[in-house]
Image (cartoon, coloured by chain):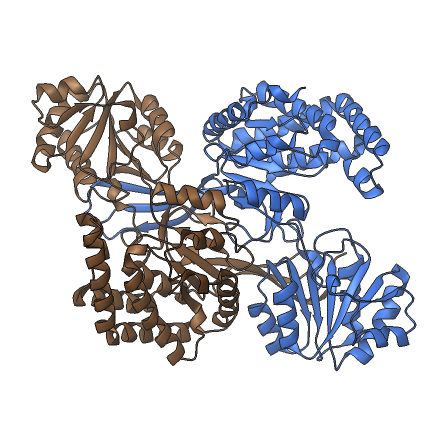
Chain colours: A brown, B blue
């Protein structure tokens, strides 16, 4: 497939037209479509796994690391899990058509607010073939057309997956333009996509900080940014260390490579002499590297913690995505709040405290998508929150914040039903 | 005031700091502040009206037109109305702190979604001094700091109004940086403002299409666009003309200079021979200029309608803001829906019909912020809808759509209250 054959305007116009068709489907019709997609994925197993093997070999040859290779890898079990997930999406309640408000206006006119599809969603994502199917399923469920632009390392897999989706759409008489894949690694197509504001209603970006910044700079379309978590935990002076330490350890080590893992621990100075030795002991088996500030360092050193460094300024406000923890001893809650206001990415931050007034202040004053009291930051996730799905974890404040699921793929319209009402 | 003294980064940082202070105020404290602002506006009447007289004289000298002059003009009555409006904002229910959802997670952890202030709102608006006060009051009510950039023609008025606001803030010990005015006509400051994404959470744009496009192009911050209404009405074949004609007339003439006024009438071909002569008679007293397509023209001509032109392509998809109406005769509902999909700005569109299935299809398929059945498009307005206020009428689909009031100035956060919960 050469770059020159992709005309982004045509693609956008087709998506817009497809969105009008999708808006007319009932919930049952959309669920039938999702089941057809699951079946089609299973039928295409051979082609999909062959394409994925090709991507995998190329990625290995290109020297990709273990975690990235693992993310792009598919086998029969993983493909089956993807198909099963599509069937699960069919079971979720559909927000489209929901009446949010219903009221009588002063003149007797009936006014309702109804949830509707957004229209066309553009998704720019990393080299994860499961996202291609997940996002398509969630968009179709909510009546949205979708334009997909996945990582170049999974291009062959995505083409094969898109073909399976296309066949399912056609088999039910739905336009195949409802799901379109930009099957080219040309970055200029992303730039063009970001300017299609007459066709695309929302851009979802999944990837690193560089991609987010690129989209912000170039997009004429509203962009949902997220997925970058510089997460904090504040261990207050009012604390039972026996229950607190396991929460800190869980937030850091349960899955260190993801956005809701802990990056920075702030410790109240009065509890530091007791907490840090116990924490050092608890973290040791996981080989967590500690980057301690000038006040925290001596306690770790006294505990003879082996993987210990002095923190630099860059160790605060950094998302490690690794078994690394920066630790700072603070004077009090105010200093902790100040630190979080300065360094948090607004994803997930937690306080560990037995004092209700401190918990209250933390919940009110920390301006993040998710704020926790006496719990791990690792809970910020659509499935954990019971949303049944997740298209992104938004760290911006408009439209959707935190785990974003089906509702985030909808908008609403106001509907006024009159009896020949005129404005006085 | 010279341009060089305005450091936008300082202004942004001060606003961010002020937002943290405002987030700590109770609803009562914010309402007290609004009453203090109303009182301060009354105390500053002399200075404000003198500054406004200066703006008015300069605008007259610059040759501004009647409607623009009228919008920037203040007198004692108008200023009193502005102060009274601020007191009314104090009476509105405050969405901040509202719990949207409350649930128990699978592990017993309590999870709530709470409405919170957005943080810092930037507003770029036309030469209307009342907006300076309205928007500041709504932002303060919802705990947001605001950066205001009003039209250059009302700079002196805005400086005087901002001084009254500042005095009220200081009198209650609230930081005056909660409301900051960019007191310079330098457009480059707008460009700088649009890049302050680390300090400003949302930009609200009120003005013409050029300003909206400028903001979309240059902003790193989410922008609420709106206020541009290319509004349609479709007169179906199933119709009682006696009740339908007054609705068309109301939508066009009741206030033609605003965004929810009717621009294009689509007439079902079977009703055109009866409807158009009656419409011509009803519009005549208002001197509405008709721009009729090739099928509609003969009916208006036969009625000897005096202000009649042949429509050009530009007459469809244009917001007239004037006593001008484009008219097209269509084959059926499908053609009307197609026309609206192609030309509507997504603001307000209406159908006049006695047939329920047609009304249903119109409500479902027209993708606009407000959709009406048998009612005038003129109702799309925060006050008419009973929202008590309006900061903008959004024609985009994310965050807020249609009349946007206090709720549109908030976001939410997820709050997890655990008992030392860890992720399994």
Give the camera-side residue of A212 and A394: A212
**Number of numbered labels in the structure image:** 0
A49 shown above or below B156: below
Horizontal side of residue B63 vs B20, given as left or right: right
Q: Residue B292's x, y, as percent?
A: 80, 69
| Quadrant of the image containing the N terminus of chain B | top right
Whether residue A45 appears in this view of the structure is yes
Give the camera-side residue of B6 and A348: B6
Give the camera-side residue of A334 and A303: A303
Horizontal side of residue B199 vs A44, given as left or right: right
Q: Quadrant of residue B207?
A: top right
Q: Residue B49's x, y, as percent?
A: 79, 26
Q: Residue A416's x, y, as percent?
A: 63, 63
A211 shown above or below B23: below
B19 shown above or below B220: above
Identify the residue at horizontal 79%, vertical 66% (top origin).
Answer: B311
Horizontal side of residue A108 vs A130, given as left or right: right
Whether residue B95 appears in this view of the structure is no
Q: Residue B390's x, y, as percent?
A: 63, 45
Give the camera-side residue of B387 and B61: B61
């Amino acid at each position: 497939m050469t770059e020159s054959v992709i005309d982004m305007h045509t693609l956008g116009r087709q998506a817009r037209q497809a969105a009008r068709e999708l808006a007319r489907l009932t919930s049952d019709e959309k669920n039938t479509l999702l089941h057809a997609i699951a079946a089609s994925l299973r039928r295409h197993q051979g082609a999909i796994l062959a394409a994925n093997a090709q991507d995998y070999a190329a990625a290995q040859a290109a020297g990709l690391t273990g975690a990235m290779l693992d993310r792009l890898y598919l086998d029969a079990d993983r493909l089956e899990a993807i198909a099963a997930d599509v069937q699960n999406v069919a079971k979720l309640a559909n927000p489209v058509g929901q009446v949010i408000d219903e009221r009588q206006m002063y003149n007797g006119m009936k006014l309702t607010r109804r949830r509707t599809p957004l229209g066309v969603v553009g998704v720019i994502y990393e080299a994860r073939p499961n996202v291609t199917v997940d996002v398509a399923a969630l968009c179709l469920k909510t009546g949205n057309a979708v334009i997909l632009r996945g990582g170049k390392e999974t291009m062959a897999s995505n083409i094969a997956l898109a073909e399976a989706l296309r066949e399912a759409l056609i088999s039910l008489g739905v336009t195949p333009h409802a799901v379109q894949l930009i099957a080219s690694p040309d970055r200029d197509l992303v730039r063009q996509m970001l300017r299609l504001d007459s066709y695309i209603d929302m851009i979802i970006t999944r990837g690193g900080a560089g991609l987010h910044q690129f989209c912000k700079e170039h997009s004429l379309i509203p962009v949902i940014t997220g997925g970058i978590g510089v997460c904090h935990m504040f261990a207050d002076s009012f604390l039972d260390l026996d229950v607190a330490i396991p929460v800190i350890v869980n937030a850091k080590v349960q899955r260190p490579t993801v956005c809701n893992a802990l990056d920075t621990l702030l410790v109240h100075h009065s509890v530091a002499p007791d907490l840090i030795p116990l924490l050092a002991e608890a973290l040791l088996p996981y080989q967590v590297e500690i980057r301690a500030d000038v006040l925290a360092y001596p306690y770790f050193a006294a505990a003879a913690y082996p993987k210990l460094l002095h923190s630099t300024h860059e160790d605060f406000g950094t998302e490690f995505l690794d078994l690394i923890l920066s630790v700072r001893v603070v004077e009090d809650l105010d200093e902790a709040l100040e630190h979080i206001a300065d360094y948090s990415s607004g994803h997930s931050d937690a306080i560990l405290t037995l004092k209700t007034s401190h918990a209250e202040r933390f919940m009110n004053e920390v301006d993040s998508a998710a704020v926790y009291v006496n719990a791990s930051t690792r809970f910020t996730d659509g499935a954990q929150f019971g949303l049944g799905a997740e298209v992104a974890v938004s760290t911006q404040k408009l439209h959707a914040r935190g785990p974003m699921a089906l509702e985030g793929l909808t908008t609403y319209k106001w509907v006024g039903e009159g009896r020949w009402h005129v404005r006085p």
